[in-house]
Image (cartoon, grey):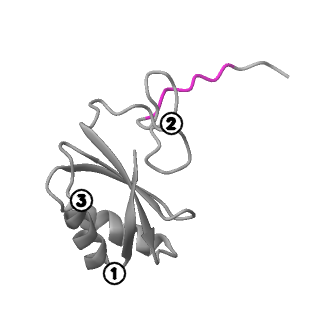
Amino acid sequence: MSESTVTVEPSATTTAEGSCCGSCGTGTAGAPATAAAERAVFQVEGMTCGHCVSSVTAELKKVAGVTEVAVDLATGRVTVDSTAPLADSDVAAAIDEAGYDLVGRLGA
């Protein structure tokens, strides 16, 4: 049997370090190019599925200054990065619009 060499080119989803970009949820994302000025974590009740996550994420991204939203469905924790501090009332209104209940702010 003869030996052959296979060269694998990095795909669009790998970073310079070779780690996954994380966009598909199967790997660890690299650090964002720019960090948000603020990070807050909120407890949300009523989320049970991926649709819930999508709804909460979409509504929170409509809030002025929000740059990133990460939802942990298992714990109900929602991490929100923003360019400036967010008013709890704005976050509560967005979560209410999505159809869920804001329990409160947990911190960063």
- The image shows residue 42 at horizontal and vertical percentages of 39, 59
Against 90, residue 68 (above or below) is above
* The stretch drawn in magenta includes residue 6: yes
- The image shows residue 47 at horizontal and vertical percentages of 47, 74
Residue sitting at x 58%, y 22%: 7
- The image shows residue 107 at horizontal and vertical percentages of 39, 49
Label 3 residue SS: helix
Q: Nearer the viewer, residue 44 or 66?
A: 44
Direction left: furthest residue: 64
Against 59, residue 9 (above or below) is above
Give the dominant element type of the magenta stretch: helix, strand or loop.
Answer: loop
User: How many numbered marks, from 0 up?
Assistant: 3
Look at the image and give the residue range highlighted in magenta.
5-11
Q: Nearer the viewer, residue 1 or 52?
A: 52
Q: Nearer the viewer, residue 1 or 75?
A: 75
Q: Residues within 10 Å of mark 3 (few under 14, many from 20)?
A: some
